[in-house]
Image (spheres, grey):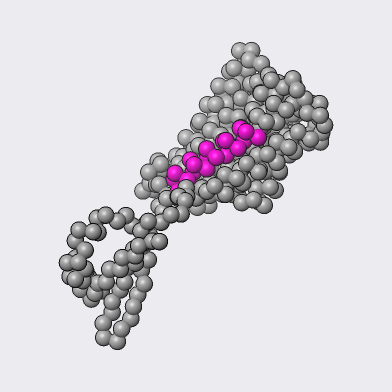
Amino acid sequence: MAAILQVRFRSSIGLFDPSFSARFPKFLPQFKPVSVSFNPISAPTLCCHRFVLRFGSTSAPKIRRNQYPVAAVMLLPDNPVVSDICATAVAGGIALSLLRLWQETAKRGLDQKLNRKLVHISIGLAFMLCWPMFSSGQRGALLASLIPGVNIIRMLVLGLGILKDEATVKSMSRYGDYRELLKGPLYYVTTITLACIIYWRTSPISIALVCNLCAGDGLADVIGRRFGSRKISYNKNKSLAGSVAMASAGFLASVGYMYYFSSFGYLEGSSRMILGFLVVSVASALVESLPISTEIDDNLSVPLTSLLVGSLVF
């Protein structure tokens, strides 16, 4: 049973009752307070208050959310507007640098399918690492969403043939056809944009969306091509190794980002949330393995599954 120590003091003078310090001078340091509850007690002539300190809690520890989100990661904490603008420039620069890197590797002859999946895995996950640089609230979410949002326009312009960029087409398409940008790549940037605007960093759904799309679906193809000799019985185009890799990578990435955002106080991680991530990742891998996946792009089916299942479990 939890031991209870009651400390009475007079609010009128703000001092502890002298009898308390006289009776418990040696024993107080031996206890570690777990929780404190404050209960006011009214009296006709004197107002006293009671503190109740409970010790020895036996409940299992939770992954606690910080009471005060860390503002130190903002570039200019004293000026949130300018800080958000700078964060947009930094995050956009990181995403653009990664894209230029994979464009260069594509030019140098790296396998096109592998190169495309490296773009797929790295861009979204690296961008999500930049989210704590933005301020809390809708302004930060909107400015962050500009980065993938601009790429929606870019995919439309390139995919419709209005502009040409062979390096981008080669690094993002399966067969080098610019019209492919209107499918998978467009769904990809749209998913990340909506994750920013609607759910942002305080929701596990945004984590599940991005992690299963980037880490899960990306590694499924890489591992499946290398170790996927054993095919799934109901879909010979998918391998068991690829499906297991997808569920595992999506789940582990989701848990990692849960701890990451919890450290800043944006959400409170828990074992229930971890279980939810497992359910979402397994469901996404299962849907991706179905024969219908040959008709519906993975960049559309995986986010939709993550969204629907995530809405049920979180």
Magenta: main secondary structure equals: helix
Image coordinates of residue 146 in percent, x first then y, are 57, 41
Residue 299 sits in which quadrant? top right
In this rendering, position of residue 13 left or right of residue 297: left
Answer with the quarter of the image where residue 280 lies. Answer: top right
Classify residue 188 as left or right of residue 77: right
Q: Nearer the viewer, residue 196 or 176?
A: 196
Q: Closer to the camera, 220 or 213?
A: 220
Residue 101 sits above or below residue 47 on the image? above
Which corner quadrant of the image does residue 234 belong to? top right
Residue found 61% across the figure and 25% down from its top: 118
Question: Residue at 51% of width from left, 47% of height from top?
Answer: 269
Residue 87: where, in percent of width, then height? 46, 39
Q: Residue furthest front?
A: 1
Q: Nearer the viewer, residue 157 or 5?
A: 5
Residue 196 visible in the snapshot: no
Which portion, as a residue range, is magenta?
247-267
- At horizontal 34% and vertical 78% (from top left) the residue drawn is 41
Counting the numbered discs, the total is 0
For the N terminus, the quadrant is bottom left
